[in-house]
Each structure stands twice: as structure tokens, then as C-alpha cells.
Image (spheres, rainbow, N blue to C red):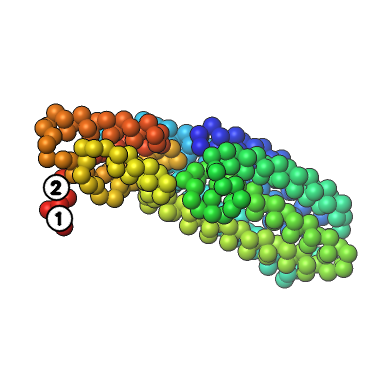
Amino acid sequence: MAAGGSKIAIYGAIGANTLIAVSKFIAASFTGSSAMMAEGIHSLVDTGNGLLLLLGIKKSKQKPDDMHPFGYGKEVYFWSFVVSVLIFALGGGFALYEGIHALQDPHVIEDPAWNYGVLSAAILFEGTALYMALKTFNKSRKNKRNLIRNIIKSKDAATFAVIIEDTAAVIGLSIALLGVFLSQQLQNPYIDGGASVLIGLLLLGVATFLAHESKGLLLGESATPETISVVEKILSKNINIKDWNLPQTMHFGPNNILLVVEIDLIDELNLEQAERTMESLRLEIKHQQPKIKQVYIQTTDLSSRA
């Protein structure tokens, strides 16, 4: 997926979260709802996270240099990890604090109309932003049914971070809306505080999942089995190759893969023919798998290792 697609999803999320955060804080000031205050912080954190993801995309486009010969593609993964930490510490942590504080010092919500209006509008805005992110994400996915599996397999951390954030936002807003409704209808302020605690636990879980996925990419995940299979098919069809080791790959960004493979050439080739064979392999691999930007082919006698 192109970075441009990721940016569209992020811009949509930033715009929605900025407007929603302001609305939530205004509503919280009028009603005193702890769930609404927790949701306001949640939207504020999500707005900042979107800006960090844009920063990561921008930095990832820097050209390779002596200190980073494979480029800066992993900047996206680093900032996605930072986003997960912020969701955990600021979003989840503050929501839990606000909820526990509300349970210790409960207050009945005075004018829930503000909350109903803001939360309903926020669900609409966040749902629209989520739809945009899913549409962008699914453009490059053959199987669009299993979203969780696609996120786990995806190397586009910026876009799936937005999807995870927006999904958590819609669920959190629904919890807040239900908490405000039940708290007002039953005249039980503890329900509002409990809703804030649930939102905090939701954000902690989401942040943990996002951190786990970002960590794997940051440490260096291999290309998909489908990509490696295509490379092996190219190797198997070349009449000048006797054998090869399992291709080793690593993602340096959503669309930047490093490939290293050892091959055993037939004995009849001279040096010039061997060089031409390896060069044609590089060109064919890059043509069939455009995400593979660097191809390093090493020749060796694999039979001697048996």
C-alpha cells in the first residue's frame, strides 16, 4: 500500500478526532461526566497520534545514507510503537484514573442532552473515519473478511494503527453513551464511573496489541510466505541454478523488502555467465515483486554442506 493511501486514512482520523475532542470537553464541562472526560482525552491522544504517524511517514522517505544504508523505512514502525505507548499511558491511564475518581466521588449527570448529542455525532464521525481507513487498507488485500488476521500479516503499521484506534474509539464511544444513559435513567452515578473504567481497560488492551504488532515490525519481520514462494519459483525455473537456500527477507518499510539468498550455480558457467545469471535474477525478482528493493545474491557450493 502506498504511503499516500495511509495519509488519507490518517488525515481523516485527525480531522474527526480534533472536532470530537473539542466537543467532548465542552460536553464534559457542562455535565460533569467522567466517561465524557475520558473520551475527550482519548480523542485528544488520537489526534496527537495521527500527527506522529504522519511524522513517521515523512521521516521514512529519507534517502539512504552512510549511517542508514537501507534507508529510514522503519521510522514508521518506531512511531507506531510510540503511538501504542501513548495510548497505554495517556489514553488508558487517564481513563482509569478518571473512572476510579468518579467512583470515589460520584456525581449525578445534570444535563445528559449534551452527552447524547456529542457522543452520537462522534460515533458518526469516528465511524466515517474507520470506514475510510478500512477502505484504504483493503485495497491491497485479497481476503477482506478476516480483518484481525490481515492486520497481523500487514506491514503497513501507519494504516493499521489508525484502524485499531478508530475501532477502539467507536467501541469506547458506545460504552460512554450507554454509561451516560444508564447512569441518568437509573440515577446511579457509579455507572458513569464504571464506563470510564471500561474505556480505560479497552485502551490498555488496544495499546498492548498495537505495541506487540509494531514491535515485531521494528525488530524486523520477514516478507510474507507468498512473496518468498514467488522468489523460489523464479529460482527453480532458472536452468543455471542447481540449488538454493531458503531466501532470507526483512521489511524496512511497508513497501521496502531486503532479500538475501544463497544459490549454487552449475559448474559449466564461467565468471561472466555467472554474473549475467545473477543480474537477470535480480531484475526478474524486482519485476515480479516490486516491494523487494534490495536483492543480494551469494554463490556458494551447497553440496559441500550436506
Total marks in image: 2
- Residue that carries the numbered disc 1 in the rendered image: 305
58 is higher (above) or lower (below) than 251: above
Residue 306, image x and y in percent? 16, 57
Identity of the residue drawn at 78% across and 50% down? 119
Give the amino acid at mark 1: Arg
Q: Which residue occupies the foreground of this view, 53 or 275?
A: 275
**Residue 92's mark?**
none
- Residue that carries the numbered disc 2 in the rendered image: 301
Residue 190, image x and y in percent? 77, 69
Identity of the residue drawn at 30% across and 48% down? 248
Give the amino acid at mark 2: Asp
Q: Which residue occupies the foreground of this view, 187 or 220?
A: 220
Q: Which residue occupies the foreground of this view, 59 or 38?
A: 59
Identity of the residue drawn at 87% across and 52% down? 113
CB within 8 Å, label 2 to label 1: yes
- Mark 2, Cα crowd under 10 Å, few <14 / some 14-19 / many 20+, is some
Identity of the residue drawn at 22% across and 41% down? 241
Q: Secondary structure at mark 2?
A: loop
Residue 22 visible in the current orientation: no
Q: CA distance from mark 2 to mark 1?
A: 8 Å
Residue 303, image x and y in percent? 15, 52
Residue 191 visible in the current orientation: yes
Report the residue that reaches farthest toward the bottom. Answer: 104
Residue 56, image x and y in percent? 47, 39
Give the left or right position of residue 207, taking residue 302 as reference: right
130 is higher (above) or lower (below) than 107: above
Q: Secondary structure at mark 1?
A: helix
Give the left or right position of residue 67, taking residue 217 as reference: left
Give the left or right position of residue 166, taking residue 265 as reference: right
- Mark 1, Cα crowd under 10 Å, few <14 / some 14-19 / many 20+, is few
